[in-house]
Image (cartoon, rainbow, N blue to C red):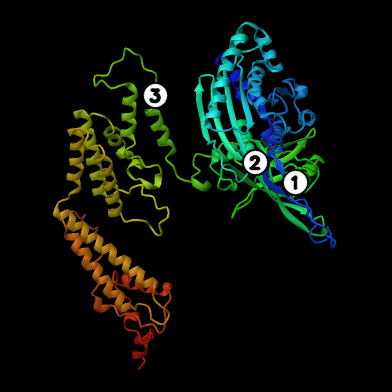
Amino acid sequence: QYTLQICKRKMFSVSHKTVFVVDHCPYMAESSRQQVECDVLTKSRAQGVIPLAPVSKSLWTCAVECSMEYCRILYDIYPRDKLVNYIVSDSEFHILNSWKQEDQSTHELMSALAAVGPPNPREDPECCSILHGLVSAVESLCKITELQHERRTTLMDTAERVANRGRIICLTNAKSDTHVRMLEDCIQETILEQNKLAAGSDRLMAIQQCDLVLVHIHPQGEDTLVSDRPKKEISPLLTSEVHSVRAGRHLATKLNILVQQHFDLASTTITNIPMKEEQHANTSANYDVELLHHKDAHLEFFKSGDLHMAGTSTRENGLKETITLKWCTPRTNSIELHYCTGAYRISPTDVNSRPSSCLTNFLLNGRSVLLEQPRKSGSKVISHMLSSHGGEIFLHVLNSNRSTLEDPPSISEGCGGRVTDYRITDFGEFMRENRLTPVSESSHDPSGKLPAERAKAQLERHTRYWPMIISQTTIFNMQAVVPLANLIVKETLSEEDVLTCQKTVYNLVDMERKNDPLPISTVGSRGKGPKRDEQYRIMWNELETLVKTHAGDTDRHQRVLDCIIACRSKPPEEEERKKRGRKREEREDRTEKNGSKETDDKSWQDSERLKGLLDKEDQESEVIKDSPDSPEPPNKKPRLSTEEVQPPERAKGPVSLLTMWTNRITVANSRKHQEFVGRVSSVNNKFELYQQLKDENG
């Protein structure tokens, strides 16, 4: 029922009925003083021919032309349901058409205006008044249209739900602001009188809302005594706005803006339309054509915020914007099937211009034109299409974003479509823990907080520290930290909760003592990633950050933080042992790094330096072995003295990595067993066999 009321209210809004009241008094015959050049043949004019003098239109002509343009745009975009009643006012009122559908066309109005003719400048101004037309306009708004009658007949018992609203557009030459206020008071009194008559009649409807748009037209170069005024509520039934406009192109621009405001229209300019020149058939030039249509055709731009990408530009009057779309050359005559989300009738702003005429003829011949958003870079995006159906041209909105018929995007897609390692499973748990459920009025919280406030407070606690990406966190990837992470976000902790958190911290200390690996992400880093000590330092820092965000809640939260800080501060002997281990790792890394960066003109390490390095390592091993926390090494064979092992000859020139490694292994192995006598006593790596036989035989 409520939806039905909304539909009726929208259907019979103020824009359903529009009454034009155009002043036909003698002063409207005055010149607008905007000259129109008639002599355009300046180059081919023969000698002795007197050029034609420029002419200027009267205020009446300007008013008629601009009001007809308003009606043309309205009829193009809304061929039904939006009705116009045209009234001319002088010594009496002249109603040129009715609310019937057959009278709603520019042809009917132009024929009636031709019969009226221009104002008579010799007529007595005292007998003429715009009030005659305004009173008639109010009476016309009380008359029932065919659509209103149909709805009232359908609803029967609820006929009062059919609304009766309308708009009066008055084109006149007012004398002053006082004159304008007098006209508003007259309309207000007439509405009250007509509503009394309509209350006792079945053929009339009381006016529920009337918008008065008074346009004061004055010649160019003449000061006006009427000032502009925005929309103002005169009474609950009447609102009024005043526009003081110069005749000519300024009046045309004003009514073009008003028709867009009154009927929710928007402007689109088609650029780069290729057209052949009339004088040079072999050449073509690019033209622009501005089209008006319902503003919903731009809805996708507003939703996505791509107005700047669609080429929004402001016209020279600075009051209305137009969105620029670029012409795409059609490939075939056949209309291809496109995924369309809307189709809206269009009306050219300048219907008589050659570019507008060529474009409409091109479309009415069965061709379709795709329109793209102008972009400085990237692939083109085709967002709209112009095509005709049944002799009417429509602007089709094509789906340029992800289609609702396609599968939804993956939750792992980050900005720009990049796959991101979001904590999707954890986020699902987070949503489950923070679901809202209805609560009965009888439930009472001891703290006195409302359920909504408690829910917001819980959500705030859970999100104080919550990394979204797996690679940005360590503790949330560790099963050992789960008990502490689940408890620390609670509003209050019990003694048992504090013990559980402390037990979790002690388990982490035990893991560090055992040198257990941590789930540290190596994404984006080269090599093996951070060392084990660095991994634990990152883990402790993150854990401390998490608990610190909740430490101020209660004293028990603070106790958990104190436990973490106490466990992080290790005894001096532990730190010394860690320090020696880190130095050893750094030396090994430095040795490997230096070995990999040797240049070709410098020889690799020879066996003497390798032997010295191994001696240093043995010494360091002894130091670490002597520390109290080091395990006892396994029993090994006694090594021989280093003097018994002779180093191999120094290699001449660069040595390959394989040779260097083989030499190192050879030297290391040679110290673990007794070397062959022949190899020890060889000369230039050669040893003569069976020397004893040679000695025996002399």
Q: Quadrant of residue 366?
A: top right
Mark earlier in primary sequence (3, 2): 2
- Give the label on residue 23, or none: none
Mark earlier in primary sequence (3, 1): 1
* Residue at the spot of label 3: 436
* 416 up-or-down from 260: above or below: below
Of helix, strand and loop, which one carries label 2?
loop
The structure residue drawn at horizontal position 39% and vertical position 50%, both measured from the top left corner, is: 521
In the rendered view of the protein, which quadrant contains the C terminus?
A: bottom left
3 vs 2, front mark? 2
Of helix, strand and loop, which one carries label 1?
loop
* Residue at the spot of label 2: 247
* Residue at the spot of label 1: 353
2 vs 1, front mark? 2
Point out residue 184 in the picture as x, y percentages from the top left corner.
Answer: 55, 24
Identify which residue, 74 or 655, lies in the foreground.
74
3 vs 1, front mark? 1
Q: Estimate the spatial distance between the alpha carbons at disc 3 and disc 1, rounded to whole Å.
A: 61 Å
The structure residue drawn at horizontal position 27% and vertical position 70%, both measured from the top left corner, is: 614
Identify which residue, 444 or 230, lies in the foreground.
230
